[in-house]
Amino acid sequence: AKVSALLASQILSPVAMLASALSLVTPSLVTPAPGRVAPMQRSADVSMAAKVSVTAGQVAGMAAAVLAVGVQSASAGPFTRTDIASLTYQQIKGTGLANTCPVVEQVDGMKTEIKVGGNYKIDEFCLEPTSFQVLEEKLTKSGVVTEAVDTKVTTRQTYVLTGMEGDLVQKDGKLTFLEKDGIDYAPTTVQLPGGERVPFLFTVKNLVAQSDGATSSISPGLKMSGGFNVPSYRTGLFLDPKGRGTTTGYDQAVALPALQAGGDESLFKENNKKFDVGRGSIELKVTSVNAELGEFGGVFVQKQPSDTDLGSKVPKELLLKGQFFGTVVPN
């Protein structure tokens, strides 16, 4: 009996110590803070709480009310410039709104023609692609045909070009946009249905776009087209897995010593890195104009090459479609 009592005291003493320690904790630390989720109830508590009559509709209404009060961030687009300017960083953060272009503000009775005469420029030019396709050749009964294959974007939401600007002049009676500065490139990667990934530099560097016909104004229906440069996806300081690069690194595969004396013709492109600059083309069509605010927007179709891995691969052709936005301001 004495041994049993001793064992019982040794077993219960930690429990008693824990109970005394918990009794010293202030109620504010034990009680859940307002607005937070209460701890999970035990089975006994659940059985007791079951006596309280709460319908599923009341629970859903309470949850909706909590969400309505707690969520204060903005939903992703479409937003006008005025809407975006009224939002704070915390409201935009995590919504995807930063990866979208504004839309033209619609006002009843607004003028839909922007007269361009004198010294003007396009500011806040933005390109937002919504469709990414890779042009691939396919062998059919009628011969080899080129088809656009849909892809999936694997890049984070950082592929929109924005803040671009350039002169808007008239050449041979045609409106001409000369892109000069801004966030005019974005490294992007898409994935084909078979799993192959295609990296490319989404860009419109040094874009020169002209209107189809002679005009001195921007109005719905205006079409502009032109070409631009597509710099290499990789830069000069990039090193491949074997340590080879354009300006730094090895000039050959050091892990293959037998090829150093010759016979590495098959690796010529991999060893001799080069900074390729391709060409792309774009077509823009204006669909909406607000002359009072100097805003215009529409849709675009763009074609450009993919990455060549510093000259070692044959580039693929990409077809991008989306919407654009810009403003016309005095230069």
Image: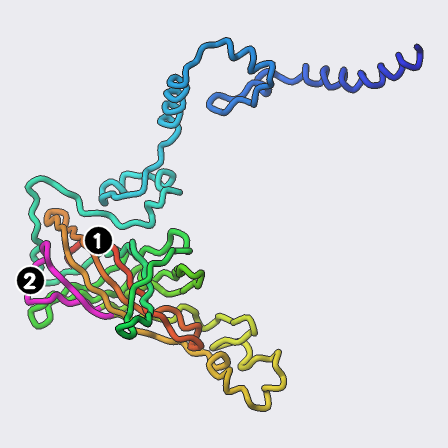
Q: Position of residue 154 (x, y in %)?
A: 42, 55
> Is tag 2's residue or tag 1's residue first in the polypeptide sequence?
2
Q: Position of residue 17 (x, y in %)?
A: 76, 18
- Considering only vertical position in the picture, is 299 above or below 240? above
Query: Magenta region: which residues?
Result: 208-227
Task: Please give the name of the residue rendered at 60% of the width and 80% of the height, measured from the top-left corner.
Answer: 254
Q: Marks 2 and 1: which is nearer the front?
A: 1
Q: Can you see residue 124?
A: no
Relative to 32, is 311 on the left or the right?
Answer: left
Task: Please give the name of the residue rendered at 36% of the width and 65% of the height, measured from the top-left corner.
Answer: 201
Asked whether 147 or 255 is in front, the reply is 147
Q: Can you see residue 25?
A: yes
Q: Disc 1 designates what residue? A: 325
Task: Name the kind of residue labelled 2 in the image.
Answer: Ser
Q: Residue furthest front?
A: 141
Residue 167, disc: none
Asked whether 186 or 200 is in front, the reply is 200
- Considering only vertical position in the picture, is 39 above or below 322? above
Q: How is the image coloured?
A: rainbow
Q: Disc 2 designates what residue? A: 216
